[in-house]
Every structure is written in C-alpha cells, then in structure tokens.
Amino acid sequence: MQNLPSTVDLHTHTTASDGELTPCQLVESAAAAGISVLAVTDHDCTAGLAEARAACAEAGLEIIPGVEISSSWSNMDIHVVGLGMNVDDTRFQARLQQQMERRLARAHLVAQRLEKLGYPGMFEAAVQAAPQGIPARPHFADALVRAGACGDRKQAFQRYLAQSKPAYVKTEWPELVEAVRWIREAGGVAVVAHPGRYKLTRSKLERLVKTFAEAGGQALEVSVATHGLDMVKQLADLAEKYGLYASQGSDYHGPSMRWVQLGRMPALPGQCRPVLDLLGWKAEQAAR
Ligand code: AMP
Ligand code: MN
Ligand code: MN
Ligand code: MN
C-alpha cells in the first residue's frame, strides 16, 4: 500500500468550494483520521477558513490557511496551492474576487451549452448546489445528477464537463506566474498542486517546474494521494534540482470519492525538504 497515514495534510476542500463537507465536518474527520496539521485549500476562495480555524482550535489541530488558485500555463489549467498567506490582505481578496467573476462568467456559458443539450435552468441549479453561490464544475455535475442526466459527478464529467466534452468551456485564468505573485505578495508559500495530474511528458513537466521556480514558486506537491511512486520519485528529484520544498496532501473532496482519504498519501522521499520547514513548523510539532 503506497498511501500511508500521515499526520500532515496540506490540500483539502470544503463546501466553501467543491468539497462535500462543511469546514466543521472536515476538521472533525481530520481529527478522527489522526491529522495534527491541516491546510484547508478551497478553489480561489478562503471563505471556509474562519469556521475551520475555530473548529481546529476546538479539536486541538494546527491549521494552515490555504487556497488553491486556478491558473493557466501553456494553454492548460494549472492549480497553485498557497499556504500561510495573510488572508485578510485586501489586495489578495480583490484578486480572489476577480477569480469568482471569471467563474460566474464561465458558468453562464456552461449553462447555455447545457440548455442546448436539453437541460435548461442549470445556471441557477449550479449556483444552488454551491453553498457560497460560486459554481465550480462539480456543482454543475451535482445539478446534472439531480436533473437525471447522469448517475454521479464522475459520469457528468465524462459526458458533459471534462475538456473536449460538449459543455466544456475554457476559462481565461491568470498566468501561472501571476498566481505565484499573488500568493507571495500576500506572504504565502506557492506550491504546484498535483503536478502528476496534468499528464505532461517528462520534459514538459520539467519546463513547468523551471518556470514556476523562476517566478518565485517555492514548493511542489511531491506526495499526493493519486500519485504513483514513480511520479513521487520524479517530483522529488525535480524539487531537489530546482531548490524547491516538498508538500504533501490528499486533495480530499469528501467521503463519496472513496479512493481518496484524509491524510493518506505516499511518504515523502528522504531527499525532500518538507514545506512545513519553510512555514516555520517543525516536523516534531506536526507529529505530536
Ligand atoms: P473548476 O475549477 O470549476 O474547473 O472545477 C475543477 C474541479 O472539478 C476539480 O478541482 C475537481 O474537483 C473536479 N474535477 C475535474 N475533473 C474531474 C473529473 N474528470 N471527474 C470528477 N471531478 C473532476
Ligand atoms: Mn475540486
Ligand atoms: Mn486541483
Ligand atoms: Mn484541490
């Protein structure tokens, strides 16, 4: 079994974006899974952090404020996790607000496509499925399931929402280097999210890492629940080569994705410098 239990999970979602659990429920599940350091990293949004912070204080967990910013590089969507930013920074929040407006604009276009496919009213339905009122694609998936168009989120992506499917609409996200700058300017650490999930060739993956490091990015998610051990090793080598720290996270979205569990991911190879060191956390502290 390559996914081992860890006490540190630095990539999780709540109902503030497309997660299934409220911040309180997420923290309860994290405590039950034996996690002692938790980062909550909702898509382009920090609205879940206040509740998560209070729940972590109650449950005795350390929380690292986080976010997962949608960006663009080489015509692809690349996600950049920010850890430890000052989320009260007004310029940072203004930038997240722009991201929300991009999401709403795209949501109208997705709904138009779905209407042509025979599913009217999907903008309103997706907004309703999103507790913060900002629809991500999984909220469209939930709305489609409710309309009887498909059985679950996965099917909705396969039939309608994934890239090259009929209701896919490209979003004009900011450049990768911009996302890094936003996080750094708010005092955070910028991390390439799940680098193994973009299906890049070795040389293109290295180009991504090089661009990111040159832009001031500081870490790679070397260990992710969905990374195989070959990918973990490849990323550990790239992090070492480009002087980057290593992060680890499950990218947990809730209990219905049964193959992803809180705190379960491959171990970080010994050559890695854990990103917690950069955030001022000591490994011993995390293990307590
Ligand atoms: P968005 O940021 O609105 O484009 O939505 C992206 C989110 O959709 C990701 O963070 C995943 O949670 C989810 N997602 C992307 N691709 C799939 C897929 N093939 N099946 C299920 N969920 C997916
Ligand atoms: Mn998601
Ligand atoms: Mn992501
Ligand atoms: Mn994520």
Image (tube, helix red, strand yellow):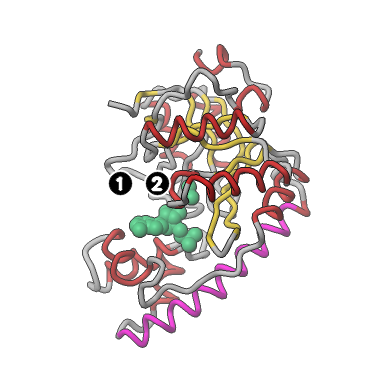
Judged from this view, the residue extending furthest toward the front is 203
Q: Is residue 256 above or below residue 120?
A: above
Q: 208 or 253: nearer the eye?
A: 208
Judged from this view, the residue extending furthest toward the bottom is 116
Q: Amino acid at mark 2?
A: His
Q: Amino acid at mark 1?
A: Met
x and y, in percent, of residue 44 in the image: 59, 55
Label 1: state its secondary structure.
Answer: loop
Q: Is residue 96 magenta?
A: yes
Q: Are marks 1 and 2 in contact (CB under 8 Å)?
A: yes
How far apart marks 1 and 2 lie (CA) works out to 7 Å
Residue found 44% across the figure and 32% down from its top: 232
Q: Which mark is residue 257?
A: 1
Q: Which mark is residue 253?
A: 2
Could one spot residue 18 in this view of the protein? no
x and y, in percent, of residue 124 in the image: 44, 75
Residue found 65% across the figure and 54% down from its top: 176
Q: Is residue 192 left or right of residue 110?
A: right
Q: Magenta stretch: give its range.
A: 92-117
Q: 253 or 178: nearer the eye?
A: 178
Quadrant containing the N terminus in the rendered view: top left
x and y, in percent, of residue 147 in the image: 27, 73
Mark 2 C-beta to ligand 1 under 8 Å: yes
